[in-house]
Image (cartoon, rainbow, N blue to C red):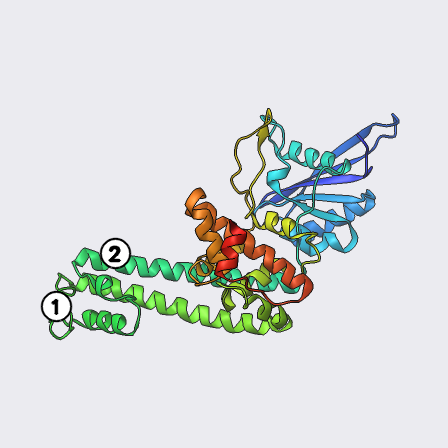
Amino acid sequence: MDVLHERCVGLDISKKDAKACVRTPSTKRRGSFTTETTTWGSTTNAVLALRDHLLAARVTLVVIEATSDYWKPFYYVALPEDLNVILVNARQVKNLPRRKTDVSDAAWLAQLGAHGLVRPSFVPPEPIRELRDLTRVRTTATRERGRVVQRLEKLLEDTGIKLSAVASDIMGVSGRAMLEALIRGEADPQVLELTEALTGRFREHHAFLARLHLDHYDQLTTMIDQLTGRIAEAMTPFHGALDLLDTIPGINRAVAEVITAETGGDMNRFATAKHLASWAGVCPGHHESAGRTRNTKVRPGNPYLKGALGIAAFGAVRTKDTYLQARYKRLTARRGPLRALVAVEHSIITALWHMLTDNVPYQELGGVLGWRIAA
């Protein structure tokens, strides 16, 4: 097998340290290579010392396995300034079974990098990384706020109060007013207007827990509002892309911001729409053996981008007289709703690749024509 990088290093990184395996040509035997494995700390000074060590070894490629967030000090602090560093997906560089040690993993990474058998992962520039941090924290806070509402509803079920059965949103204006009245000690159902739903055993214990949940909900709401304002400022260079994405059925401003943050708003790094769909994890996998295709479930992809596409697909299939709704209905009949929804996600990401590449708005085909095309 051809050697593309004669001087290569593999870094197996953990929380406290990193194993660096330097693979260089042997001085004793032509065509062979020697390896030297050393251990380095994960502090900034240790990373700087590692950089000097690798520069002295004259390595031409550094391969880092993406392990949690532990790789970031090595990738961001010192290495990319002077060395050719690539980050690789841990799923694609697994070592041989029953040979799993930190030292052997570092040597395996160096060997794969020397022969060009690894593909670098997408590491966006710093402005996009900061934008990703903001949108991902907002997504996490929004999900946590939804869980707080579920906990509050579970608490009300324990008291026998069926507020969610009569209020579409228990955190809406009327639902929140009734919750505040219950916490204050108001127990007369007539005063609370809903005799059937609000007759229960709401005690001081439940009032205490409900108050905690409401305060937590308000804190998360304030946090989300602050993040939304900061994201709006960071999205200033991407207003054109956001306006284009807003024309796709099912995509609102928040979803468009997540898509822009995860992809960087630049489609040049994705050769085709299929490459983008594969990276996002919304296209079928390949598992063929003996001429038979066995498992075609979607492969792992960017979880935040996939989640945003899922929200967009849910909204798109509920938008009347659209191509995406017609495609969903056509596929649901023979493939089931889940696979049909993934197909809609694939259609959305294919459309947005062409839109951002050619700088054109979304062109709606309509429900009738869309049904014919889907058929």
296 or 162: which is nearer to us?
Answer: 296
Q: Residues within 10 Å of mark 1 (few under 14, many from 20)?
A: few
| Point 81% across, 38% down: residue | 4
Q: Taking 268 as reference, is 199 left or right?
A: left
Question: What amino acid does circle 1 point to?
Answer: Thr
| Point 57% across, 66% down: residue | 245
Q: Which circle marks residue 195 in the picture?
A: 1
Distance in Å between CA atoms under marks 1 and 2: 20 Å
Quadrant where the N terminus sits is top right
Figure quadrant of residue 300: top right
Figure quadrant of residue 25: top right
Picture coordinates of residue 144, whole percent (x, y): 40, 59
Q: Taking 219 as reference, is 152 left or right?
A: left
Q: Residues within 10 Å of mark 2 (few under 14, many from 20)?
A: few
Q: Which circle marks residue 154 in the picture?
A: 2
Figure quadrant of residue 13: top right
